[in-house]
Amino acid sequence: MTTIRMADPATVTGKTKELFDAVLRREAAVFGATSVSNIWRCMAHWPALLEANWNRSRTLMLRPMASGHPSGFRVLARTEGDLTR
């Protein structure tokens, strides 16, 4: 079975450190986390993947009433023309 060595939050630098700090702030506020979750630590070896998933996660975790939609998710209407691009 393949395993991924998790990045140590104490040794990361640059953009990865900035993202870890942001992730921990959000996870501490929302979930009471005291350390960076393992999933983020695994993605840290690929900073572009880490950043893309952090941006995606922030979008999905928007406050329910901020979107105006009862589910809390932003509903994006697409026209038929948009789907062909």
Image (tube, grey):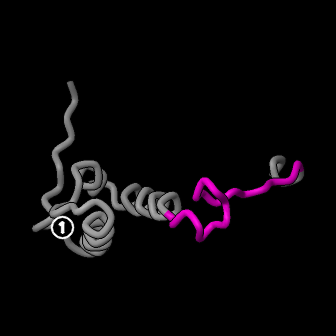
Q: Is residue 36 visible?
A: yes
Residue 73, given in percent of the width and then of the height, sits at 60, 57
Kindly identify the residue that appears in the image at 89 percent across and 52 percent down. 81
Horizontal arrangement in the rendering, residue 49 relative to residue 83 (left or right)? left
Q: Is residue 63 magenta?
A: yes
Residue lying farthest to the right in this orientation:
81
Residue linked to disc 1: 12
Q: Quadrant of the N terminus?
A: top left
Horizontal arrangement in the rendering, residue 13 relative to residue 76 (left or right)? left
Horizontal arrangement in the rendering, residue 37 relative to residue 19 (left or right)? left
Compared to residue 61, the image places residue 39 above or below, namely above
Q: Could you say which quadrant of the image residue 69 lies in?
A: bottom right
Closer to us: 28 or 11: 28
Q: Is residue 16 visible?
A: no
Kindly identify the residue that appears in the image at 51 percent across and 58 percent down. 60
Closer to us: 38 or 70: 70
Q: Is residue 77 magenta?
A: yes
Element assignment for label 1: loop
Type of residue at label 1? Val
Number of other residues with Cα within 10 Å of mark 1, as a class: few under 14, some 14 to 19, many 20 or more: some
Q: What is the magenta segment's predominant secondary structure?
A: loop
Residue 26, given in percent of the width and then of the height, sits at 33, 68
Residue 12, given in percent of the width and then of the height, sits at 18, 67
Residue 58, given in percent of the width and then of the height, sits at 46, 64
Kindly identify the residue that appears in the image at 16 percent across and 61 percent down. 35
Kindly identify the residue that appears in the image at 64 percent across and 57 percent down. 70
| Start-end of magenta stretch | 62-80
Q: Could you say which quadrant of the image residue 15 lies in?
A: bottom left
